[in-house]
Amino acid sequence: MTPVLAAALNNHLPTCVILVRSNCVLDVAGEVKFPGGVYRQLTALQGAIERHHFTVARLLLAAGASFDNTSTQPPQHLFNDDEGCL
């Protein structure tokens, strides 16, 4: 789970704003546990929409998050980037 995904799932708008301003990668999918022990891969935008956190979802969309262009792996440059958000 990425920090932006955790913030989006918990409707923590101030944290999402900070992460967006720090240019974190928005379209990395993380594993989210749902009731009944079901796990799904979601991006921060998908998680915000799933939980009806529409203000967070609008922020992520305005910042360039894509609903269908997702990756389950972070971009390789983040592994060497001290300013990454993962």
Image (tube, grey):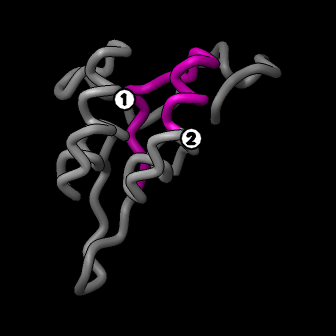
Under circle 1, the secondary element is: loop
User: Residue 7: horizontal and vertical position, in percent?
Assistant: 49, 49
Q: How far, Cα to Cα, is label 1 from label 2? A: 22 Å
From which residue to which does the magenta span run? 16-31
Front-lying residue, 84 or 51: 51
Among the two numbered marks 1 and 2 on one chain, the one whose residue lies closer to the N terminus: 2
Disc 1 crowd rating (10 Å Cα; few below 14, some 14-19, many 20+) is some
Q: Point out which mark residue 71 bears.
A: 1
Q: What residue type is labelled 1?
A: Ser
Say whether residue 14 is magenta. no
Closest to the camera, between mark 1 and mark 2, is: 2
Q: Which amino acid does label 2 sit on?
A: Thr
From the image, tell me which residue sits under label 2: 15
User: Residue 23: horizontal and vertical position, in percent?
Assistant: 57, 15
Front-lying residue, 40 or 60: 60
User: Residue 69: horizontal and vertical position, in percent?
Assistant: 24, 21
Disc 2 crowd rating (10 Å Cα; few below 14, some 14-19, many 20+) is some
Say whether residue 23 is magenta. yes
Q: How many marks?
A: 2
